[in-house]
Amino acid sequence: MKYYHFTSESNYKEILKDGYMYPYKLDHDKLKCITDRNGIFVWKNKLLDESKVGTIIFQMGSKKTNEVVELELDLDDDGFKFNGEDTVSCSHTGDIHIGTDSGYQYHVEQATIYFKKIPVKNIKLIERYKLGDGFK
């Protein structure tokens, strides 16, 4: 089944070098699901328009990079279970905060946590996004 993931260009290069995308610490304070396990944050549907732009800006700012990639992942159902538990879906609201402002909400899409490492053969580069020389 197809899922989607955004990360930095440098993380993508590491994935290619290592041969796998490995689960990482889920420490995003806005997740309304488990955050004490390693996993990979994936989108069930391809993000479009405002949601996509907001996610790219978030990735650039949080990873302090000006290069972000969008990946398509071919995932099996088994990786969505943790110790036999069913899929963990997250109700995640994407906000960009500037100073003390309450934030600009750019998406409310449903995301899911994938718990297994993903081999490179199941990862397809969809697009690269680069923003001038910002965030360096």
Image (spheres, grey):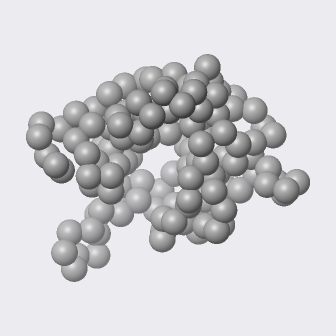
Q: Is residue 98 left or right of residue 59?
A: left
Question: Which residue is found at the position 75% from the left and 42% from the top?
Answer: 79
Instruction: Indicate whether 127 appears above or below 109.
Output: above
Number of labelled discs?
0
What is the residue that sits farthest to the right in this orientation?
84
Instruction: Indicate whether 64 appears above or below 12.
Output: below
Kindly indicate the quadrant of the structure image that contains residue 7. top left
Q: Is residue 128 visible?
A: yes
Residue 99, percent across and down?
Answer: 19, 75
What is the residue that sits farthest to the bottom in this orientation?
100
Q: Is residue 15 left or right of residue 59?
A: right
Question: Which residue is found at the position 20% from the left and 69% from the top?
Answer: 98
Residue 55, percent across and down?
Answer: 37, 48
Question: Which residue is found at the position 66% from the left and 39% from the top?
Answer: 117
Question: Which residue is found at the position 61% from the left and 20% from the top?
Answer: 121
Q: What quarter of the picture does the N terminus occupy?
A: top right
Residue 64, percent across and down?
Answer: 26, 52
Residue 123, percent across and down?
Answer: 56, 25
Q: Is residue 2 visible?
A: no
